Amino acid sequence: MSGDTLRHHRTTWVTACPSDQLSPERGVAVLLPGGAQAALFRTFDGHLYAVDNVDPATSAAVMARGIVGDRDGEPTVASPLHKQVFSLRTGQCLDDPRLWLATLPVRERDGTVAVAAPEEPPAGSGS
């Protein structure tokens, strides 16, 4: 899923978890419509980020288990498999410019965290 995908499709908010159950620097995997997954994080400064849960180097759905950190002020997550470091803001891999993670909008309302995901196309639409 790329940022372009979100711009061309309607989005829906998928409830991820109660706010008080999202611990800082620990990821949560969120199942999205159509079977895609997001990795959701809250940093120690309270910012929320969601990126694709699939590690682009290995195609394994593991990014929610990544190591959250900081590189020169940029909030990051390192893949738990080969340790490539990705910006949580942009999804760009800071170690290999050929790799990136899609980023997804996140919101917190009424004690619940939600991730925006493209709506599934209607059955039989062919798109």
Image (cartoon, helix red, strand yellow):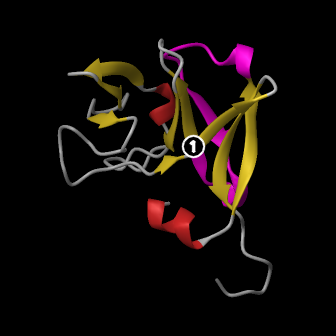
Secondary structure of the residue carrying numbered label 1: strand
Q: Quadrant of residue 76?
A: top left
Q: Is residue 25 magenta?
A: yes
* Vertical order, 55 against 74 (above or below): below
Q: Is residue 29 left or right of residue 43?
A: right
Q: Is residue 52 left or right of residue 34?
A: left
User: Could you say where residue 106 lies in the image, as x and y percent from the top left?
Assistant: 61, 39
* Vertical order, 3 against 83 (above or below): below
Question: Can residue 9 be seen at all in this image of the molecule?
Answer: yes
Q: Is residue 108 magenta?
A: no
Q: Quadrant of residue 122?
A: bottom right
Dot 1 corresponds to which residue? Answer: 38
> As rendered, which of 53 and 24 lies closer to the eye?
24
Quadrant for the C terminus in the image: bottom right
Residue at 64%, 54% (x, y): give it: 117
Answer few, some or many: residues within 10 Å of disc 1's Cα (few below 14, many 20 plus, some between 14 and 19).
many
Question: Can residue 2 be seen at all in this image of the molecule?
Answer: no
Residue at 46%, 35% (x, y): give it: 63
User: Could you say where residue 30 lies in the image, as x and y percent from the top left?
Assistant: 65, 39
Residue at 48%, 18% (x, y): give it: 43
Mark 1 belongs to which amino acid? Ala
Residue at 44%, 51% (x, y): give it: 102
* Vertical order, 22 against 1 (above or below): above
* Vertical order, 94 against 80 (above or below): below
The range drawn in magenta is 19-37
